[in-house]
Image (cartoon, rainbow, N blue to C red):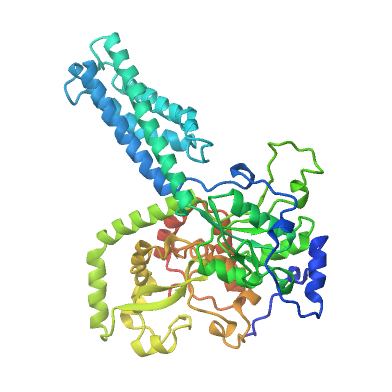
Amino acid sequence: MRPARKLLDGGSQSRFRATGQDAGQANSAGSDRPERRADADPVAADTVPLRLSRSSIGSSGYPPSAVATLLVAESLVLFAIGHMTELMSGVVGAGGEFGPPNLVTVIAAILFPIAAIVQRSFASRAESVVALWGIRLIAPLAVAELVALALFAAVFSKVPLAGNDATFLHWIGSWFIAAYLANGLLNSGFETLIRHWEMRGTLARHVVVFGGSLHGQRFIQALLQQRSDVRVGAFFDDRAMAVPAHIAGIPYSGSADELCAHVQQEKIDEIFIALPWSADNRILELLRKFRHLPVPVRLAPAPILVRSDLLKIGENALAFAPTIRERPLSEWGLFIKGLADRVIAAVVLILILPMLAAIAIAIRRDGGGPVIYRQQRLGFNNRPFCLYKFRTMRVSASQAGELKQAKSSDPRLTPIGGLLRRWSLDELPQLYNVLRGDMSLVGPRPHPMWRQAADLWDHGGAQPLEAIIHEYASRHRVKPGLTGLAQVSGYRGETATVERMRGRVDLDVYYIDHWSFWFDLKILLLTLITLFRGDNAY
């Protein structure tokens, strides 16, 4: 087999072009003078103040789990008030306690959260608590009640909702007003609680900043002074001796490589690059370096945008920080995907419990040894996790070659192990990994702790996989999956060559960049077809 060849990234040779203050600091970093770094001077760094607000660099959105809880509560309130107003208006007499009006309230309670999601009532933060009482509450409430009435009238056209029109209108009006007031109070309490959590830091966005020049110092100080919903954990810069040891108490923590390690170890929501926008080559180089990180990357406001003494931009103008790389999945995408993963995994596990027990008995009778095989795999954000599988290889062989791929007619396989691999039944214990949150139903397959080419291919050499396959680390921007686009596209089984591994990685990256809930459903359906065909399964 040919040795693996290194794939050179031409962009990695890009040079950093510093301008203005950054150029001076870069020259200082290159000098031989042994200068001790001092803390940033808050007065000098803030000569031209930078004004930030929620609209300038965005704000943390509503937590999807909290919104889901609120919508469930509002739906229950809508149903309860609908039933109470029935009793008060005398509408219930038209069909008994569980007559047609109750059916309308049930339909409205189901439609309300759907209407709120379709209208994107919680897609962005409200500017104030008062804004919650506007169209974002009135519209879904009106749509839910009116559509419920229309559906009932269309399906049960001959069934009266009330004894007369006056009673009916009294019920509908009182129901809408009471539900509006009750859900308005719920919304106000929800927003107040969210803001309280932000002030305490419970829901604050945790960010790191790359760039410690005067531009970066000004930006960090503005974040600390003006944005209570943002926490700056550290700042980084490749010019260690040209930046201060601390900026407003925030420590210097290393270069871009250390930033990547920091994001993988800590809970970081965003990366801000505080460099002049004219340093495009350097910014592109950083984007390539941060490619495998599952967090958005944004540019700090350009220096020209903060010079209000030069630009007559008015008192209400705000600095602008564009997002130059989004996260792979939005917060709502992660929530929906995670919820679907756990619900489906729990249901499937309950249904296949008898089959799991039968497989465990068969493995024990086929030579003894442990039923479950555990192995460390690389997961989300390059973090290792313990993966579970039914053992398909002999105990001594599986321990001796943990990193070696299974091959066709592999002598390490047990008789029952070959059958399990043929139908991918050995992967079923990974449903427990899905329940734990280590994995997803659909995503790039988790690889063993391969670090260099020799771990996969004979005569592969000591080159890191990331040097051979540029996007290899990008697979870990999402959780690994039980199945994936590569597995249903002819890349199931052994990756015997560099080209085959590159093809698998390309499909994994395509899936990450084009994820949708319907894409996941399509891959799950294709997986069932692929299992029956049994291609490359060994």
Left/right placement of residue 253 relative to residue 37 reads: left
* Vertical order, 294 against 61 (above or below): below
Q: Quadrant of the N terminus?
A: bottom right
Identify which residue is drawn at 49% across, 78% down: 449
Of 251 and 66, the residue lying toward us: 251
Identify which residue is drawn at 32% across, 30% down: 78
* Vertical order, 103 against 439 (above or below): above
Of 318 and 16, the residue lying toward us: 318
Of 384 and 8, the residue lying toward us: 384
Identify which residue is drawn at 75% across, 50% down: 48
Q: Quadrant of the C terminus?
A: bottom left
Residue 339 visible in rendering: yes
* Vertical order, 92 against 493 (above or below): above
Residue 169 position within the rendered picture, expressed as x and y whole percent measured from the top left:
32, 13
Residue 504 visible in rendering: no
Q: Quadrant of residue 141?
A: top left
Residue 355 position within the rendered picture, expressed as x and y whole percent measured from the top left:
25, 67
Residue 214 position within the rendered picture, expressed as x and y whole percent measured from the top left:
74, 60
Left/right placement of residue 83 relative to residue 423 reads: left
